[in-house]
Amino acid sequence: MSKRNVLLMLVALCLVTAVYAQGWDQTQLPVDLRGIDVGIRRAVDDVMEGVPEWTKVAVVQVRARDFERSVRNHITRLIERNLTQLDYDLYDRDNMQTIIRERGFQEGMEANRAFTDRELIALGETAKVEKIIVAVLDGGDGVPYTITVSMIDVRTTQKRSATR
């Protein structure tokens, strides 16, 4: 094997290692959802446009019709990774789950029911965050998948959404 081929193999190995280390492994997603990370990144960029860095943000809920919890969790991690890369102060997901249980909203999470804006603002106030993020994955049955990411300002109650 030539030095050039060995070098190319090492570069490829480094790239694969970097991709997996960054959590970009999409093998957990159904085949027709691969590539959704691009839509998520663009939607997050759109809804967070103009929001100062280090703003305290919590991802509260990702709803995905007809998908199991592992897909919703994967999409949540993708959104969280994008927010972190944009230098937002991300509220701990485990702490948010505790607040959701304490406020009696757990049944809604289990049933994949959408929280009302009022419930989301109450969760944000309890968690002492400035912005709440929710997302909905929709499509299937021959219809292209879309991801809608919404951001609610806890103080002003204004909502901004982007669909990709």
Image (tube, rainbow, N blue to C red):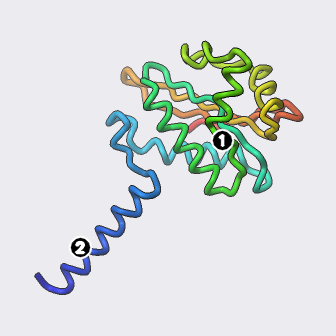
56 to 16, vertically: above or below: above
Q: Quadrant of residue 118?
A: top right
Which residue is drawn at the image coordinates 81% and 40% (left, top)? 130
Q: Position of residue 101 (x, y in %)?
A: 66, 20
Dot 2: element = helix
Question: Which residue does the numbered mark 2 point to in the structure image?
Answer: 9
Left or right: residue 30 versus residue 148 is left
Q: Position of residue 96 (x, y in %)?
A: 68, 32
Which residue is drawn at the image coordinates 65% and 37% (left, top)? 59
Q: Position of residue 56 (x, y in %)?
A: 77, 46
Left or right: residue 143 versus residue 84 is left
Q: Quadrant of residue 4?
A: bottom left
Which residue is drawn at the image coordinates 33% and 42% (left, top)? 27
Left or right: residue 19 versus residue 86 is left
Disc 1 marks a residue whose amino acid type is Asp
Dot 1: element = loop
Earlier-in-chain disc, 1 versus 2: 2
Q: Quadrant where the C terminus lies? A: top right
For the residues marked 1 and 2, what is the alpha-carbon distance in whole angstroms?
Answer: 38 Å
> Outermost residue, right direction?
156
53 to 112, vertically: above or below: below
Q: How many marks?
A: 2
Question: Which residue does the numbered mark 1 point to in the structure image?
Answer: 92
Q: Nearer the viewer, residue 137 or 104?
A: 104
Pointer 1: residues within 10 angstroms few (<14), some, or many (20+)?
few
Q: Quadrant of residue 150?
A: top right
Q: Nearer the viewer, residue 150 or 72?
A: 72
Q: Position of residue 117 (x, y in %)?
A: 76, 22
Disc 2 marks a residue whose amino acid type is Met
